[in-house]
Amino acid sequence: RRISVYLHPEKDIYGKGHQPYQAKIATGSGQLLGRGFGKSLQKLNYLPEARSDYIAAIFAEEFGFLGMLCIILLYVTLAISGFSIALYARDLKHFLIVSSLTFLITIQAFLNLGVVSGLLPSKGTNLPFFSQGGSSLMVNTGALMLIYLIAHGKKERKKEEAIA
C-alpha cells in the first residue's frame, strides 16, 4: 500500500498521499517565474509541514523553476567547494572531516529535493539552511564553520611554507 501511494499519491489524497500531491500542485503552479514572494497559496494549510519538510515546494511556487534552479545550483556549488577543500586538505583526518560534513549536508539537501519533486518517498528530512528549525541550522552552520576553518588552515600553512 505504501509503495502504491508513493507511485500514485492521487489515489489516496485524503490519507498518506495528501502531502506529495499538494507538493506537486505547489511546484507546478510556480511555473517558470513563480507567483511572487509571499504569494504561495499552498502554505495556507493546504500543504502540511510547509515550513520544514516541504519548504522547497513552497519556494518553487513562489519563485518558480528559475528559483529552484538557483537553489539546486547553490547546493551543487556547496558540494563542489566542500569536496575540493577535502581533496586539498593537509592530512587524512582533515580530508575525512571535510568530506563527511560536505556529504551529510548535500545528501540531506538532495534527499529533501527528491522527496518534494516526488522522485523519492517521504522521509522527513529537512532542507539544510532553509527549513524551519533552529537545531538543524545551528548544526549545519557549525559544519560549514569547521569546513571553513580547515580550508583557512590550509591557506595559512601555504603562507608559512612560502615564507620559510
Image (cartoon, rainbow, N blue to C red):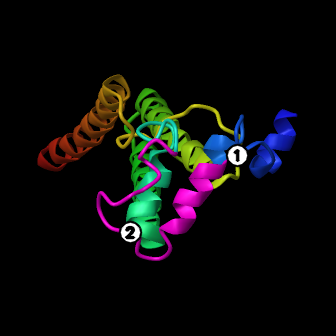
Secondary structure of the residue carrying numbered label 1: loop
Q: CA distance from mark 2 to mark 1?
A: 26 Å
Q: Are marks 2 and 1 in contact (CB under 8 Å)?
A: no
User: Label 1 belongs to which residue?
Assistant: 120
Q: For the point 29% across and 62% down, which residue is it?
A: 37
Outermost residue to the left: 163
Q: For the point 75% across and 47% down, which residue is it?
A: 9
In x, y percent, where is residue 76?
A: 47, 57
Q: Which amino acid type corresponds to the residue marked 2 in the rendered image?
A: Arg
Measured along the vertical axis of the image, is residue 68 above or below residue 137?
below
Secondary structure of the residue carrying numbered label 2: loop
Q: Quadrant of the N terminus?
A: top right
Q: Residues within 10 Å of mark 2 (few under 14, many from 20)?
A: some
In x, y percent, where is residue 17?
A: 71, 42
Q: Is residue 91 magenta?
A: no
Q: Is residue 34 magenta?
A: yes
Is residue 73 shown to the viewer in this render?
Answer: no
Q: For the point 41% across and 46% down, which residue is it?
A: 44
User: Label 2 belongs to which residue?
Assistant: 35
Q: Earlier in the sequence, mark 2 or mark 1?
A: 2
Q: Quadrant of the C terminus?
A: top left
In x, y percent, where is residue 123?
A: 64, 33
User: Which quadrant of the figure has residue 93?
Assistant: top left
User: Which quadrant of the figure has residue 52?
Assistant: top left
Q: Residues within 10 Å of mark 1 (few under 14, many from 20)?
A: some
Q: Nearer the viewer, residue 90 or 145?
A: 145
Q: Which amino acid type corresponds to the residue marked 1 in the rendered image?
A: Leu
Q: Which residues are magenta?
A: 21-46
Overall secondary structure of the magenta section:
loop
Q: Nearer the viewer, residue 90 or 139?
A: 139
User: Which quadrant of the figure has residue 63?
Assistant: bottom left
Depth-wise, is mark 2 or mark 1 nearer the camera? Answer: 2
